[in-house]
Amino acid sequence: MNVSVIGTGYVGLSTGVCLAEIGHQVTCIDIDKSKIEKLNKGISPIYEPGLERFLQKNINTKRLSFTTCYEEGLIGSDIIVMTVGTPQGPEGKPDLSYLERAAVDIASHLNEDTIIVIKSTVPVGTNNHIKEIIDKHIADDIKVDIVSNPEFLREGSAIVDTLKADRIILGSNKPSAIAKVKELYSTLNIPILETDISSAEMIKYASNAFLALKISYINEIANLCELVGADVMDVSKGMGMDRRIGESFLRPGIGYGGSCFPKDVLALQHSARDAGMTFDLLSETMHINNLQQLVLIEKAKNRFGELKDMNFAVLGLAFKPGTDDIREAPSITIIQELIKSEAYVATFDPAASNNMEQVINHDNVNYCTSLYEAVENADALFIITEWDEIISMDLFQVLSLMKQPVIFDGRNCLKEEQLLECEKIEYYPIGRPNLL
Ligand code: NAD
């Protein structure tokens, strides 16, 4: 099939590359000229494992191309996939302006009937709203059907998630449009749930909010474990062995972040409020998460008192390993708190330092290119993101470089055996009794 993908961010680029990989002819359109220039040279503007290899392979086989021009990018398109951002707007309501603008651009350049698939995460009613915009701007003799197809990929494993998703959700009131989109994905052999548009839109928010809730729940259990002397790692393992609960998203830590969970929980709460309902569980989920992002700072204050003029190493900036995305990352809150306390910060991240430097550019913060440079002379180190490079650091070397052997592990990711081998170490995990 000929497919046009609108937007080449984490979702659009992964989708475009994967659709080309399974044999479709894909043109990706983005308004960001510098992104398109890079992509046309086979360079991925984002860090995502496996993405660049697939990108180059499919450019070479001429199944994948990139343009900033809607007219060129929509020629002969059987299906148009919209993946532009829907960031948080005022009061938590998603900002739909990118989607609306793209809808006008699509409609103004369409020359034939087509199907528009909306992958962007949008509140109930948005697919119909976008259809209305398109209908208003297209020529009278052209017909467009809309299919809601929310995306569930995770950054850091976007390619695998796209090719091996748990399910594909297709929401539409047009069986012929659903049939065509099913054909698009047919070689993937992924279970498909067909539903109406509103339910498809809601499935995405309900899923993300539930995962966020699970994270806040285990974090509260971790905080209680600390108070009563239980070990949250065993508690979560024991809970996860129950198939009714499941083991995923039960890892305690310093709270969720990223471009999806925070904004999607807020957006769902906004939808509930609009519908005349208070969804208190969502407010609590967010409240717990905000406090949890400060848990390592609290631990450091309990240990040291004043943090002024102290040196802290912050290991990991991305909101999770495997990505350079720092949107709503807990590291931002932590570094800002350290700056507020007039402490000095040396950071290391294998992929996200450049992005963070755009957000936090302060004299007290030094972005290091090596983990060992970041820990030099540190009074304590914070582990924020469980990158392999960080989990497998040479702990003896790290401790020998630090001023004081104090580690706050926000991801409980250092191995117990390794910790026990260290002669002098003060180790503060989340929700665990003193291990040493
Ligand atoms: P992103 O910010 O990484 O990318 C959006 C892209 O759209 C950018 O490259 C931007 O230049 C482009 N764009 C904006 N306006 C445009 C226009 N008018 N025409 C063409 N291109 C335009 O966003 P993302 O992280 O890929 O997320 C996209 C959507 O998918 C959001 O609704 C998000 O909630 C949802 N989603 C994201 C993830 C994720 O892990 N990032 C997962 C599932 C769903």
Image: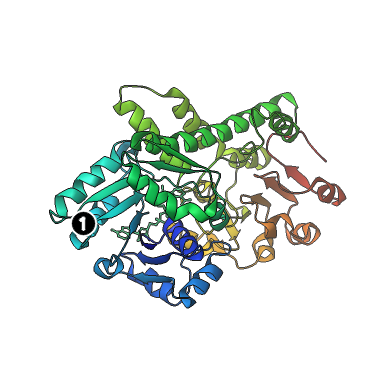
Any part of residue 119 in sight: no
Q: Is residue 38 above or below residue 359?
A: below
In-front residue for pair 23/134: 23
Report helix, strand or loop for mark 1: helix
Kindly indicate the quadrant of the structure image that contains residue 157: bottom right
Disc 1 designates what residue?
107
Q: Position of residue 152 (x, y in %)?
A: 49, 46
Relative to 273, say whether 407 is above or below: below
- Taking 223 as reference, is 144 above or below it? below
Count numbered badges in the picture. Answer: 1
Q: How is the image coloured?
A: rainbow
Residue at 75 percent across and 44 percent down: it is 427
Query: Ligand 1: which quarter?
Result: bottom left
Tell me the residue at 34%/31% (across/down). Answer: 271
* Residue at the image position 30 percent from the left and 22 percent from the top: 276
Residue 360 % position (x, y): 46, 57
Q: Quadrant of the N terminus?
A: bottom left
* Percent coordinates x, y for residue 204 in the rendering: 44, 39
Looking at the image, which is closer to me, 285 or 332? 285
Look at label 1 and name its amino acid.
Ala
Local packing at callout 1 (Cα closer than 10 Å; few below 14, some 14-19, many 20+) is many
Whether residue 426 is visible, yes or no, is: yes
Which quarter of the rendering shows the C terminus?
top right
Toward the left, the furthest residue is 140
Left or right for 384, reference 259: right
The residue depicted at 31 percent of the width and 43 percent of the height is 89
In the image shown, does 294 or 284 lie closer to the viewer? 284
